[in-house]
Structure formats: structure tokens, C-alpha cells
Amino acid sequence: MPNRFAHLPSRRAIIDRRVVADRLAVVEGGKGTGLRQAGTAILKQALDDGRAEIERRFAEHPTRGLETANAHAFLTDQLLRLLWDFTVQRIYPNTNPTAAERMTLIAVGGYGRGEMAPHSDIDLGFLTPWKRTAWCEQVIESMLYALWDMGLKVGHSSRSLDEMVRMAKSDVTIRTALLEGRYVWGDTDLYDEASRRFRSEVQSDTRGFIAQKLAERDQRHIKMGDSRYVVEPNVKEGKGGLRDLHTLFWIGKDAYGVQRAAELVEKGVLTRQEYRRFHRAENFLWAVRCHLHLLAGRAEDRLTFDMQREIAARMNYADRPGKLAVERFMQFYFLQAKTVGDLTGVFLAHLDETFASRGRRFGLPFIRRSPRKLHGFVLDRGRLALPGEQFFREDPVRLIEIFALADQHGLEVHPQAMRLAARDAKLIDEHRDDPRANALFIGVLTSPRDPETVLRWMNEAGVFGRFVPDFGRVVAQMQFDMYHHYTVDEHTIRAVGLLARIEQGKLKDEHPIATALFPQIVSRRALYVAVLLHDIAKGRGGDHSVLGAHVAERLCPRFGLSAAETEVVAWLVRWHLLMSATAFKRDLSDFKTILDFAGAVASPQRLMMLMVLTVVDIRAVGPGTWNGWKRQLIGDLYEAAEEVLRLGHKQRGRGERVVAKQEALARALGWDAPAFQRLVRKLPESYWVAEPLDVLERNARLIERAGHDKLSVDTQPDRERGATLVTIYAADHPGIFYRIAGAIHAAGGNIIDARIHTTREGMALDNFLVQDPLGRNFDDPGQLERLKAAIGDALLNRARITERLRAKPLPRPRADAFSIEPAVLIDNYASNRFTVIEVNARDRPALLFHLANALFQSKVTIHSAHVATYGERAVDTFYVTDLIGDKIDSASRMRAIERRLLEAAAGEGAMAEAA
């Protein structure tokens, strides 16, 4: 049998089987268990020495993933052969075995392929000709105990040949494992017989096996997020990972009888260049997986943020201007994942041609078969194909046209055409300024059908990045943070898809305002281009919004946009974060916030476009990023700014709005006039401006229930906002805000917004919006009771909050993988009445409590607090005054406040509680 590991250098430095065999030959330990344990100790030492040598080599050559995986399998082979011989010669010697006592040991699964990560399971199969004899059982049991004593994780089976065939026929997982079966040691004739029977009796239904493996792959992709561009990918099971390459190999082995992936070239399935890409991707992914196992000290296949930074350093990636080493490493990772996707398409196309005469196609369902020809392209079984291999070279604009036709006619692009498009993509370089090519591209981008799918095909073929080189620079580029779930190109394509679905009315329930606005937008083309370009300049160093506006000014005329459209696109790209920053970090009840925002936008059309762009940008970040609270804030800001832009300064005055709210509340409450007037006299004008009608009603009913009580807490889950409204009505005193914040954190809540009011009778009326640490509604009855109790204990001095928080485990340790320098901005111009303090810091448990405590120590009064979280980064904004209600304008006082807040943000400084 060929030596699978002949390519490994200096194999005896990993393990010298002869030397270890000599030690085992003279080991003493009596019989049975004692002898096995003595032999196991020698083998364990050989295992440790071999692993150390492999790790040493890997440290010297940290990109040699396949060699490292092969070396671990080689080491395992040698140890198993030694253990087998030791068991059958010393522990259970059988000098004259019967025909039934023949047995062979095979490697299956990944180990059978000859590839193992440092902490992979060892998958073994013990085969016997018939039912297992007592001697066979003893040998198997002894070997397994020895392997477990060596600290190895073993997956094993022991079957007769008939059992092997029967189970492989009925279970595709077993069939797949045995497909990779490889002889390790034992009776060679028995192994040859097993191989013959497997080929003749099991491998007869190749088509059924392929269909099952592809269905299995699709289910795995869905489970793993169904994108190869998730920012914490699973190297083994994720889309574009090792398992996808293994699936191709399994299918190739079953369909074409190949033993190694390189043989797929001889079978005509892959070209030599494609096999080199296959090998390069496989080697890289194996290197990453081996580093993961070594860093974790266990089997670990998820490439988490903390691991990404470590592995980038191990693989010798360095920082470059505008791009961290870890971002360069992950960009290369995603390019390899894309390669896996490309090769999958090529491979399935070949299978489709091979098995076409035997039934329906693999992959996508049938598509209508006419017309047969389309602008020189041909239709092959419902897919857009080429009449010849030189078709793109004869007219490179066809590289764009094929995708435009696919969009217009609802067709799939033939994988062979995708293969040739990838080969010839560079030819479009000379035709980027061609008006026809640009018109076709804009037609795809602004398609009323499914631009997301077709743009993704263009990206997979490499044509998108060639035609728009600025987009090519962000292909596979990740952002090293916990906020963005996808690479920049994937985020952008998803945003375009969301925009199309909003325009089609498919997201009306989730985005009613954006859906209603879309028909009023004058230039939908400008909006689509703005969505395409909003993140185009990421990774260049500097503000990507500013740099992106310059890119837009250069690209839009090439795309055929007018000067007016170009100006709008450049403005939208420059200010695409303005609306979300204002909505999430500023007090929308402060009219100056609305005036400043409206002044920056200056146009109702821009406001509508910015609104829709903001929605799709946030939604495309990833699952769970958009919620009811964000929808309300964005909607409130839009409506307030729209009123200013439509009516200017003639809008209803503050006093009129207060009266209108009071009249609406009176109708909702149904109280008699004297009772309602007593409520009105209690509350300041600012309260009526700040709170929406539903909160006003809940607050009023709480005040009524409280009567003369000095402390009352109400919780009301709010599905619409995706949070729970927590209202505290209590006697006001210094430090009340930070105590409440600490109590909410201690009870497991996460504060996303806070409005603080003081009645004219000296009572605090504070409204907090609270979610759980994962951004979901905080509505479990037990949680809410604990929350009420915690607030009561904190305000009545029955518990020390700092001690409770110190004892609480960290809910988000992943944020520790990021280094964020805290920053404090103090602004006396953002509001007419308050000093606005914005704190940027790494998110951590009870951050708001610590910041509020620092402000309490600084002797300032907090009037409202607004919390925005972007993955690991928190932005907490406070509207404050000094103790007599004036803005803080002393330079020395501002420096002292800044110092305290920086210490609190960094987890330093005094945390003494008020008496």
C-alpha cells in the first residue's frame, strides 16, 4: 500500500517506531492490566514527544497547515501500530488464530484522510470477518483503554463485514466515514475484502449519495449562518470552510474513484490552476484550525475575535496603513472561503453534466428552458451559458451583460460561464468607462427584481471588484469589532437587497415609514448608488465617510449619474451615519437637537433618502442589530426633522405642544378635572416635552397608585420598543440615578435609555428602558421581581451595590479581545439648557453605573442619559447641569469631570457609595 506520509520530512524525528518498539519489548508489568499500563506510559511519552516536535515545526513554519495535519495523523498511525503489536503479542498473545479471529484496524473520517488537528478525535474501525470472538473483544477493549489512558479522544466501531455493508447502505454518515477508510494495521487480506465489498455493494448509488451530501451541506450552512462572510467563522463547519472542501472530495471519491484531490485534475473535474487554488485554500484553513486547537488547548473550530488577533500574530501578519494585522489576516481567510465557494460551483457543474442524463439537476430547481438564445448567449437546461470559450474575450462588456440578462430574465448563470467569467474578469479593466457597460451595471444595481442575488454572483466571479476597483478593495474585508457581523462587501450587498425589498413593499410591517417614503423619492437611482458606496472607503485610514464621498464624486459620473445625482450621492455617503448618531446619542426632546439635525440635512428629499439609507445600513449589520427601540428613535427623529423642514420656524410652539399632550393624556386617563390639574401642577414643562403619550399615561397611573408612598417601582414590558419600561417614583436625593442604574445592572438588566425628572414636590420620576444583555425584551416575571427588589434595596440602603456588582459574573467577556481607548467629549453648544457629555469606552458590565457614580462624585445633576452600544464599543451620553441648574462652563471643572469619567470608563478610580 502506498505510503500516504512519504512527503513528511524527518519522520523519525516525530516518532521512531523501531526505538519505541524496542522499549515496549522489554517493558515489565506482570500480565493484563499492569502490563498494559506500563506499555501505555511508554506510548504516552512518545505521543508527547511527537506532538512537541510537530508543534516546534509548526511554530517555525506557521502556514504549513496540511503538513501539520498530516504529521499528527502519521504520529497516530505509528502509535496505533505499536499498540496493536504490543496488545496481540504481549497482553493477549494468540499464536494460532482461527479464521474467525482475523481482525484489521482502519482509520475512518478525517483521520482516514490522513489529516488531524492537534486535538482532533481519532476515528477507528475494527473489522472482523464474522461475529467478534472473545479474543477480538479483549484486544479491542485493551487498546481502547490504553488510548483513553493516553488522554486521546477516540470514536470507534467494531463490525463484521456484513454489518459494515448493511450499516453503510442505511446511514450516509457511516458511508461517508468508511468512504475515507484507510488501512492502519492488522490482517491485509481482510482489509482488501472489506474494500472490495464496499465498492461493489455500497458505492452503487452514487447519485443518491451526492444528493444526500449536498442536502446535508445546505442544512449545515443554514445552522452556521448561511454566509461565508460571518466575522467569527467556524473554520471546520462554516460555509466556505474545511467541511465544504471535504464534501467535494467525498463526492469526487464516490463518483470518480479518486484517492486524492489532485486526481480530480486527471478526471477533468478541475483545471490545474483550480486545483492549486483548492490546495492553497485547504492548506490555509488547516493552518488556521491547527493554530486554533493549539491556542485553545482543546478541539476548537470557531475563529473568535480573541483567537483572530493571536493567530494573525502567529502567522506573521503585520499592520499596514489603515488596516490592522488581524484585518489583513481575516481578509485572506475570507478570500480562501470565497475560493471554496467558487470551486464548489465548478465541481457541481461538472457533476451536473456527468449525471444530466439520469434525472434532474443538482442544486437549484429546474428553470424554464426557453428561449434557446439570448443576445448571443445560449441557454443550457435553463441556465445562461456561453456559445464558446472565447465569448467574453471577443467582447469583454459581455462580462457585465451576462449578469444583466440573468437579472432581466430571471435566469441562473451556468457554473461553466461563471468559471470563464472568473478567468476573464481582468478583461473588463479596459472597459470600465464604456457607457454601455456602466448602464448595464446600474441596471443590475437598481433592478426591481433581485439585485442582491445577481450582485453576489458578480462578486463571486470577481467581475464586480474588477469593474468597480474601489469595491474590489473591500471584498472579503472584515472590521475587527463585535458590531459588524459580515465583511464589508457582504454587508453592502445585503443592504442593497434590503433596499430592494423595502421598495417592493416586502418589509412594510417592519419598516412602515421607509416603505411609505420610497415612492416619494425622486431619484431612486441615486439612493441605490449611495447604498452601494456608503462603506466603499473602509480600511483606507481616515474617516471612511469623508473618503467615500470623494470616491462617489469620482464614480457617479462614470455610472451615468447627473451632476445633481452625484451631489446627492456624495452627501449621503458623507453623512450616512448622521441620523443614527443623532437618534441614538442625543436627547430628541431637546429641540436644539432637532434644529441642528434638520439644519445639517436641509432638504426633505435628502431627509427621506437618509432615513431609508440609515434603516438598511443598520439592518444589514447583522441579525438582532435592528430592534423596536431603534425603529422608534429613528422614526421620531425623522418626523420631528420633517416638520421643521416642512414648516420652518412656524411649527407649533413648545407651549402649544405641551398643552396638546396634556389634553390627550386627560382623555386617555378619564380623570376628573381637579385630579388631573393636581398632576399637571406637580410636573415641570420639560417632562411633558420629553415623554411620549403612552409613557405619560403609565407614569400618571403609577403616581396615582403610589399616593403618599416614598418609593414605588413599576415595570412594563414593551414589545413595540423591544425593551421594558422601568419607572421609579421616589423621594429625590443626590446619587439616586447611579444607585438605580447599579441596581438594574445587578438584576441582570441592560439600560438603553434613561430620562430623569423631578416633580415640583421634590419627587424623582425616572424612566428607564431596559433589555437583557443580548438586546432582548427584559420580561421574565422572576427577573422583574428581582429588579424591583434590587432597586428598593439600593434606594433604601439595604445593600451595597458595588459588592453585588463585583460578585456578578461578566456577561460579555468577548469584549476583552478589543482595546478601546476611553474618550470623553464635553459640549456646551449641542443644547441650549444642558452641558452634553459623551463617553466612548469599551462596553463592560455596569459601565453606566460607574459613569453615573463619577458624575455624582463630580457634583453634577443628570437630566437624561442615552446609551448606544456598537458591539464592544459603548457610547453613553449625559445631559447635565451643575447643582443649581446651570451649564458647566468652568474649564478646570470640565477637566476634573473628564478625568473622573476616564477613570470610571477604564475601570479605575474611586467607587465609594454615598452614605
Image: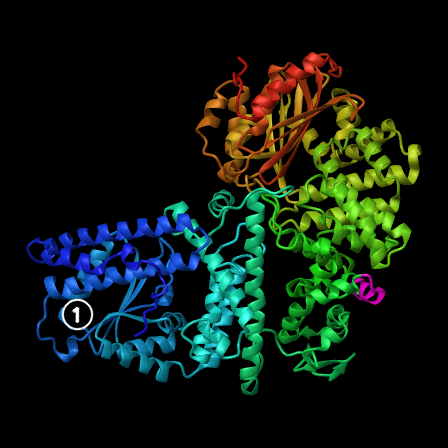
Assess disc 1: are there few (<14), some (14-19) or many (≥20) residues with their C-alpha within 10 Å of its C-alpha: many
Label 1 SS:
helix
Measured as percent of width and height from the top left, residue 506 is found at 73, 60
Measured as percent of width and height from the top left, residue 16 is found at 23, 58
Measured along the vertical axis of the image, is residue 321 above or below residue 15? above
Residue pointed to by mark 1: 136
Residue at image position (75%, 68%) is: 400
Measured along the vertical axis of the image, is residue 195 above or below residue 587? below
Residue at image position (20%, 76%) is: 131
The answer to whether residue 524 of the structure is visible from this angle is: no
| Front-lying residue, 813 or 459 | 459
Judge left or right: residue 218 versus residue 24. Answer: right
Type of the residue with mark 1: Cys
Measured as percent of width and height from the top left, residue 420 is found at 65, 73
Measured along the vertical axis of the image, is residue 14 above or below residue 84? above
Judge left or right: residue 549 versus residue 24. Answer: right
Report which quarter residue 86 is drawn in: bottom left
| Front-lying residue, 31 or 474 | 474
- The secondary structure that dominates the magenta segment is helix
The answer to whether residue 411 of the structure is visible from this angle is: yes
Residue 440 colored in magenta in the image: yes
Residue 203 colored in magenta in the image: no
Judge left or right: residue 58 versus residue 446. Answer: left
First to last magenta residue range: 433-442
Judge left or right: residue 743 versus residue 858. Answer: left
**Callout count:** 1
Visual colour scheme: rainbow
